[in-house]
Image (cartoon, grey):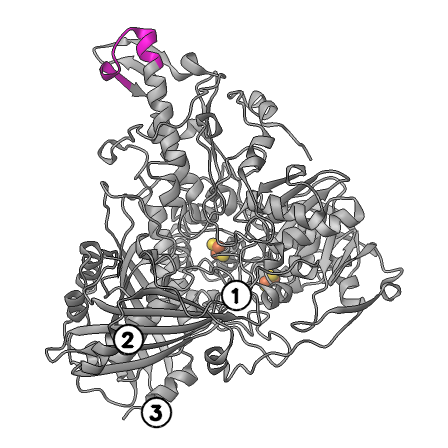
């Protein structure tokens, strides 16, 4: 394993030598003992241009980013960004991503935050613009011509009137530092001039992946590497009593049994040997702490104490408005725990020596992992280096962090590099699930059928989460090794909201979002109350693609449809009447138009109660209150004899500001849409009184390739003069409600609990009046 | 431990392993191949597929001792970066993946099927792919790439 300094590294690659010390990086990641920064998404980055961009003597550009490729095309898009801002060919930009020894601390690559963070007037994009202006200023001095008379092409600056007068980037700065800070006023290249950014450049990793050459973290091999296998407790809450090492004595290849508090692992020379030994190892555990009954779990959530209560909005007139309304509509919605359930199980390679450690990991958070892995190992953070290597798509906090601790602990115990890849059941039974929800809603309507008040109250369980910079106990391995999850901070009553953000993704699209006189919502309903009760979860939880927004949008958008149906109003028209945000209105109209929306109330008239019924439904969202607009029309068929729902077609319109790579964006939207179908129709974590029972693809049901896949059509709305927003979580968010509304349109049966299994659909069909 | 002589992508290899070792581990750990991957280890996802005698075989549930003298083809045995196989090229041209971790299973399963049944109908292809998983849900593009391969072949 090579521990190159960035200095040497850059020398070796012929790029710039820069002052960028490891000590400087650590100092910027400050942790407060006992307080987890669990949801921190964006790190501090760096205000030093040299932290982001280096130009070699040959004029080639090396850029450094803390936002990594997770399969969403970000590596290619960031390369396009730098090529564009610096006017160099795409091929001459080398992007170095997510290595704590080299790249700025940008926290976590998540939350659909990469595009807004690195493609607006800050961080990577600003570094590109700052560098171009700095180079132009130098060229102006060198050529004796004012900047406005200079042009740039392919890394060469020339005098517009006399192109023979020119100087290259390599000549201007090659292999020397800029030694300047980012200029917050540096001018980005306007989208109208883009030639690389905004184009459907193919992703750079794809040829290597398609031909089996690409190195995932799973393929990292280092000399002397051993293989580890974890032995997780048999039930939730079980603790270790004894490990009988003699039970695996003499088994081929076994190197060591590793025990630390409740963490148990087996290290062997080869993976198959480690697996055999882990299966055979006699371990005695205490009984588990028991789990609440799954059948009544939603009632259980409602009754949990203590709670942490949050008002996202509260106009304080909701009870009064409900009392005086001409009509009140009510409904309750249930959402299950779901899991990331990555396609490949999590894997990491750690090389822990006496005083330093290197970890190869597919974590979304290299700098935070450096800090927490150091805690797990009892090291100082500066003794740990984390190098990102792509893994299987994660969709949030999957097993990548936990397996990094697994590998680190086992490597430390044997003093040799150890690779760990989790067993399918070990990942599925213990990952940080996307949260369940119970949501009660009430709406007051006036006599002319306008919503005058919207009331929302929800209960949702939480435990652990992202480890952030100092809470390794937020994921299972850290917890087993003796670290506590972030403490549950009860809070009742909820304080009044102080500002509107909708970052917690709880507020419906149809309210004004007014807090302290400032209105940030996308709708027209002024009387509004949104109250969320967090309660303690029996399972670890964490961000899963569209955290809270997916569950809440299912409830909000289904409810909007129920209200429209109670008034015999067309669902699209009724939405438009209650929306105020022009961009949200535009995506709704655009999806409806593309789908040839047939305007009429739901359910459709003349429904036959047998056979196959078909219908269409609409749903929309502004993700996180400011991070991506999306609307979807779903067309479904329901087999009324079996309750099986077939999604035939999904049409979605998306607006995430200026589009950096239209093909990459489409890929994200298509994937998000089908991920949504899978989660709406199939996915649910299950458990018995002791343990999770959804532990493989026969007990946790995903959408396979094959006949159940609908057509997906995407409409991209480009907004070159707006801010860059995220698009990784918009499409998945709107699917459940669009399908629920389509089922209602087809059959008159309302599904209020995800997933819409044939049994649940059948029950709803049978319950029709 | 026992000695096995394997023929993989046209090359002979000798390994000394426990006969019960699934072929997948031999390919990815002893031979350090990157195509076949561990997804579930249970025969439920397709991630570990290799082609043996024209069939897509799930190497995670195939003991190395069951392979015998049959030639094994993995993803890297189809084509190279410079000269990708037609089905690999179809996946590159359609940008038919996100994380790409599942691509081995999708490509090897589709190739084995279409090579046996070049004139398969759309319904037959869908049926053939229905035991293969992609959690990034890149299904739409993958089906496009598979059809493109079918067209190029004929
Ligand atoms: S890894 Fe072999 S089928 Fe899943
Ligand atoms: S592309 Fe990620 S699992 Fe298929």
What's drawn in magenta, residue-wise? A138-151
User: Which residue is painted at 31% across and 21% down in the image?
Assistant: A153
Q: Ligand 1 appears in which quadrant?
A: bottom right
Report x, y in % for residue B44: 57, 67
- Badge 3 marks a residue whose secondary structure is helix
Which residue is denoted by mark 1 in the rendering? A433
Report x, y in % for residue A300: 50, 81
Sequence-wise first label, 1 or 3: 1
Total marks shown come to 3
Question: Do residues under tags 1 and 2 come within 8 Å of each other at their CB atoms?
Answer: no
Residue situated in front as seen by the camera: A308 or A740: A308
How many residues crowd mark 3 within 10 Å: few (<14), some (14–19), many (20+)?
few
Report x, y in % for residue A408: 70, 49
Residue situated in front as seen by the camera: A239 or A77: A239
| Residue A252 lies within the magenta run | no
Q: Chain of mark 2?
A: A
Residue A605 is left or right of residue A291, and the answer is: left
Report x, y in % for residue A275: 74, 61
Which residue is denoted by mark 2 in the rendering? A559
Residue situated in front as seen by the camera: A201 or A736: A736
How many residues crowd mark 2 within 10 Å: few (<14), some (14–19), many (20+)?
many
Sequence-wise first label, 2 or 3: 2
User: Which residue is painted at 38% across and 53% down in the image?
Assistant: A728
Q: Is mark 1 within 8 Å of ligand 2?
A: no
Q: Nearer the viewer, mark 2 or mark 3?
A: 2
User: Which residue is painted at 73% across and 46% down in the image?
Assistant: B13
Q: Chain of mark 1?
A: A
Which residue is denoted by mark 3 in the rendering? A766
| Up/down of A285 relative to A583, above or below | below
């Amino acid at each position: 394993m090579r521990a190159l300094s960035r200095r040497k590294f850059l020398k070796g690659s012929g790029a710039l030598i820069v002052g960028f010390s490891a000590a400087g990086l650590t100092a910027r990641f400050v942790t407060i003992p006992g307080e987890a920064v669990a949801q921190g998404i964006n790190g501090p980055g760096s205000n030093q241009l040299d932290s982001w961009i280096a130009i070699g003597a040959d004029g080639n550009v090396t850029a450094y980013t803390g936002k990594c490729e997770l399969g969403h095309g970000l590596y290619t898009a960031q390369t396009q960004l730098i090529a564009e801002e610096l006017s160099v060919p795409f091929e001459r930009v080398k992007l170095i991503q997510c290595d704590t020894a080299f790249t700025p601390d940008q926290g976590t690559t998540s939350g659909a935050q990469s595009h807004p963070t690195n493609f607006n007037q800050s961080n990577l994009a600003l570094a590109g613009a700052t560098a171009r202006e700095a180079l132009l200023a130098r060229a102006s001095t060198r050529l004796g011509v004012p900047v406005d008379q200079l042009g740039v092409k392919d890394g060469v600056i020339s005098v517009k009137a006399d192109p023979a007068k020119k100087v290259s980037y390599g000549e201007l700065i090659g292999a020397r530092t800029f030694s300047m800070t980012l200029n917050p006023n540096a001018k980005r290249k306007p989208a109208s001039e883009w030639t690389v950014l905004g184009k459907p450049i193919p992703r750079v990793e794809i040829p290597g992946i398609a031909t089996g050459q690409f190195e995932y973290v799973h393929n990292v091999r280092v000399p002397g590497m051993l293989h580890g296998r974890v032995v997780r407790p048999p039930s939730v809450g079980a603790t270790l009593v004894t490990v009988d090492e003699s039970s695996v004595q003499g088994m081929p290849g076994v190197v060591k049994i590793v025990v630390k508090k409740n963490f148990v692992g087996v290290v062997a020379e080869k993976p198959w040997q480690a697996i055999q030994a882990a299966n055979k190892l006699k371990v005695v555990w205490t009984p588990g702490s028991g789990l609440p009954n799954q059948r009544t779990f939603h009632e259980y959530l409602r009754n949990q104490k203590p709670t942490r209560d949050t008002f996202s909005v509260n106009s304080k007139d909701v009870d009064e408005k409900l009392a005086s309304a001409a009509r009140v509509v009510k409904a309750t919605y249930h959402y299950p725990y779901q899991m990331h359930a990555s396609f490949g199980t999590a894997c990491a390679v750690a090389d822990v020596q006496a005083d330093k450690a290197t970890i190869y990991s597919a974590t979304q958070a290299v700098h935070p992992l450096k800090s927490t892995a150091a805690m797990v190992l009892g090291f100082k953070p500066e003794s740990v280096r984390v190098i990102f290597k792509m893994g299987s798509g994660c969709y949030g906090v999957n097993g990548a962090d936990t397996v990094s601790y697994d590998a680190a602990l086992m490597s430390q115990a044997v003093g040799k590099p150890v690779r760990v890849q989790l067993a399918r059941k070990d990942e599925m039974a213990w990952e940080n699930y996307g949260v369940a929800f119970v949501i009660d809603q009430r709406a007051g309507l006036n006599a002319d059928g306008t919503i005058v008040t919207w009331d929302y109250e929800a209960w949702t369980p939480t435990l652990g989460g992202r480890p952030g910079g100092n809470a390794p106990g937020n994921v299972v391995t850290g917890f087993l090794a003796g670290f506590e999850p972030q403490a549950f901070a009860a809070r009742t009553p909820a304080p009044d909201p102080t500002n509107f953000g909708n970052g917690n993704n709880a507020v419906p699209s149809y309210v004004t979002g007014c807090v302290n006189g400032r209105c940030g919502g996308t709708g027209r309903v002024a009387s509004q109350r949104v109250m969320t009760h967090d309660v303690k979860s029996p399972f670890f939880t964490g961000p899963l693609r569209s955290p809270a927004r997916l569950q809440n949008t299912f409830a909000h958008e289904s409810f909007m449809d129920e209200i429209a149906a109670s008034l015999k109003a067309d669902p699209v028209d009724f939405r438009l009447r209650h929306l105020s945000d022009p961009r949200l209105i535009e995506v709704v109209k655009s999806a409806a138009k593309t789908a040839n929306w047939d305007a009429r109330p739901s359910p459709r008239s003349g429904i036959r109660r047998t056979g196959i019924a078909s219908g269409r439904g609409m749903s929309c969202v502004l993700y996180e209150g400011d991070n991506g607009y999306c609307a979807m029309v779903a067309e479904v068929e329901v087999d009324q004899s079996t309750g099986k729902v077939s999604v035939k077609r999904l049409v979605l319109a998306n607006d995430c500001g200026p589009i950096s790579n239209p093909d990459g964006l489409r890929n994200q939207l298509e994937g998000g849409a089908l991920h949504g179908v899978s989660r709406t129709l199939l996915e649910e974590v299950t458990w018995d009184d002791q343990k999770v029972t959804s532990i493989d693809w026969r007990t946790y049901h995903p959408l396979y390739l094959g006949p159940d896949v609908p057509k997906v059509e995407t409409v991209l709305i480009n907004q070159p003069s707006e801010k860059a927003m995220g698009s990784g979580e918009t499409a998945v968010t709107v699917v459940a409600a669009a399908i629920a509304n389509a089922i209602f349109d087809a059959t008159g049966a309302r599904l209020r609990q995800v997933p819409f299994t044939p049994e649940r659909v059948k029950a709803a069909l049978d319950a029709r009046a | 431990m026992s000695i096995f002589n394997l023929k993989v992508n046209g090359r002979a290899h000798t390994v000394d392993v426990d006969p019960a070792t699934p072929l997948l581990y031999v390919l990815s750990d002893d031979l350090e191949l990157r195509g076949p991957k561990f997804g579930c280890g249970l025969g439920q996802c397709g991630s570990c597929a290799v082609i043996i005698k024209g069939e897509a075989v799930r190497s995670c549930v195939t003991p190395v001792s069951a392979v015998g003298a049959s030639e094994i083809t993995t993803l890297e045995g189809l084509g190279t970066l410079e000269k990708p196989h037609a089905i690999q090229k179809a996946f590159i041209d359609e940008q038919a993946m996100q994380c790409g971790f599942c691509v081995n299973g999708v490509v090897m399963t589709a190739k084995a099927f279409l090579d046996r049944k070049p004139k398969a109908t759309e319904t037959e292809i869908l049926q053939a792919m229905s035991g293969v998983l992609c959690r990034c849900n890149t299904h739409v593009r993958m089906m496009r790439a598979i059809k493109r391969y079918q067209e190029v072949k004929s």
